Image (cartoon, helix red, strand yellow):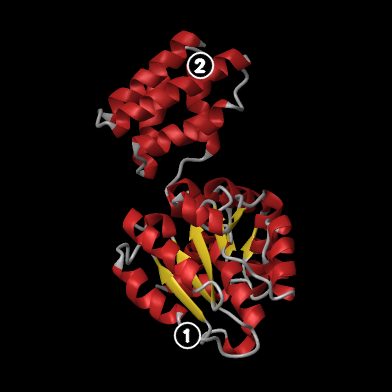
Amino acid sequence: MVSDIWIEKFRPSNFDEIKGQDKIINRIRNMVENKNVPHLLFSGPAGIGKTSTVLVIAKTLFGDSWRQNFLDLNASDERGIDIVRNEIKDFARTKSIGDVPFKIIHLDECDSLTKEAQQALRRTMENYASSTRFCLSCNFSSKIIDPIQSRCTIFRFKPLEKIDIEKIIENIVKMEGLEVDKKAIGALYEISGGDVRRVENVLQSCSVISKKIDENLIYEIVSAAKPKEIKEVLELCVGKNFVRARDVLLNVMLKHGLSGIDIIKQIQKEILSLDVKDEKKLEMVEKCGEIEFRMVEGSDEFIQLEALLACFCKEC
């Protein structure tokens, strides 16, 4: 995919280029400089630098021979025990090339591995600890069995802050010759939630249409409602104007092609900026959770959204 080419193009090539994870990177840098790298477990949301960090570790340790000493697998493609017994074990049992006494196996999305595969992986980590280091990446460390967690140094990555996203966007803008205004940068941060991969994909899609990227183009590309549109609906509810709030919400959904779940998520974000008492905000957020659950269980989306607006009009 073209988007994958962009992601590889802007992937960090050294530790200094990895943004938003300073404490983690400093600890890992010390390990790499001393060539004393334990088994590693990286957990956190998507698109925040876990895979990039593993690649930088491999390139820094092995230099030009990093491809010969590095095995990159995605556990979501091969979830069963065979991948551990065959491909991983075959790579782990051979010696490394160069002056580093171990190779690295990166297992991405390892929380997708079955329990049986994880048990087999645990034994492989034990048997080949002298010749191989494992770097495991996952979204939820709770899905990794305790014996594997106890063998790894765990690093919990966090979504990037707005200032870090801005630095990454500035770098892309400079390299690609784009023009992105401040409102557009703010929109990119809100939409991505700290996910750099999503930022790059949205920017790439926008750059195909125009080199001058503004807030309107971004919301058009991602098919999301602007915060002010959702806030208008909530303010109408606060003013107890149910019919008008319902009509505006329907227009927003039809214009952007949004699902009920998409709307609920945006409503929940905008509740916090409403000019109502904190107790009312708590009640509104609680109601959002209830309506979201009903939608997931299969209830009609628009009826549930109408019920949500009716509740807001009564409580505010």
Q: In which quarter of the image is residue 250?
A: top left
Q: Which amino acid does label 2 sit on?
A: Glu
What label sits on residue 283 in the rendered view?
2
Q: In this view, does 189 lie above or below 29?
A: above
Residue drawn where x is 40% and y is 76% of the image: 89
Q: Could you tell me which secondary element the residue under label 2 belongs to?
A: helix
Q: In which quarter of the image is the N terminus?
A: bottom left
Earlier sequence position, callout 2 versus callout 1: 1
Q: Label 1: how many residues lie within 10 Å, few (<14), some (14-19) or many (20+)?
A: some
Whether the residues at callouts 2 and 1 have beta carbons within 8 Å, the answer is no
Residue 86 % position (x, y): 33, 76
Residue 45 % position (x, y): 52, 51
Q: Which of marks 2 and 1 is in front?
A: 1
Q: Is residue 310 above or below residue 119?
A: above
Please state which of residues 63 and 14 is positioned toward the viewer in this rendering. 63
Q: Which amino acid does label 1 sit on?
A: Thr
Q: Name the residue under label 1.
A: 94
Q: In this orientation, does residue 24 appear?
A: yes
Q: How far apart are marks 2 and 1 (CA)?
A: 59 Å
Q: Is residue 212 above or below residue 97?
A: above
